[in-house]
Amino acid sequence: RLMMNLATIKKLSVSKKIRFFLEKSFGLEILFLLQSEGELEGIENTYQIILSPKPKYPAFKSFLIYLHDKRCINIIDGKTKKSSKILTLTHETLEEFSRIF
């Protein structure tokens, strides 16, 4: 069970990797989804399941690419279709998550 309070948010905001998820209103939801599911298949599918307020799809995809460039998430070719990408948290992001929670 995750415990969220101001102290936890402060830890997230000064972390090396997780702090980048805080830059968008839907970022924490992506973080928690990836942490709980292990992986998400398809950027479009991920866009559809996000419940938080989100931008138009191109801006959403750009944010995922930004997280990838910051080495927070992995974006790899899908298992069945290479065009369908699989999203996972990087090892470093997972370690940070475990230390905070």
Image: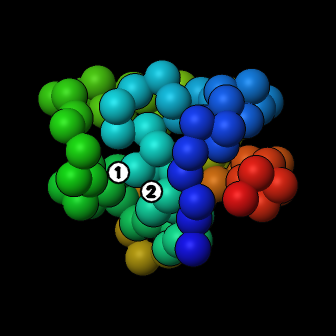
Determine which residue is flagged by label 1.
43
Residue 4 pos. (x, y %):
55, 51
Helix, strand, or loop for circle 1? helix
Dots 2, 1 in contact, CB < 8 A: yes
Q: Nearer the viewer, residue 17 or 81?
A: 17
Query: Which residue is at 58% across, 60% downward?
Result: 3
Helix, strand, or loop for circle 2? strand
What kind of residue is marked 1?
Ile
Circle 2 packing at 10 Å, graded few (<14), some (14-19), many (20+), is many
Q: Is residue 93 above or below residue 80?
A: above
Q: The N terminus appears in which quarter of the rendering? A: bottom right
Is 7 on the left-hand or right-hand side of 48?
right
Residue 88, quarter of picture: bottom right
Q: Is residue 60 visible?
A: yes
What kind of residue is marked 2?
Lys
Q: Nearer the viewer, residue 21 or 39?
A: 21
Mark 2 to mark 1: distance in Å?
6 Å
Q: Is residue 32 above or below residue 78?
A: above
Is 96 on the left-hand or right-hand side of 3?
right
Is 92 on the left-hand or right-hand side of 79?
right
Circle 1 packing at 10 Å, graded few (<14), some (14-19), many (20+), is some
Determine which residue is flagged by label 2.
85
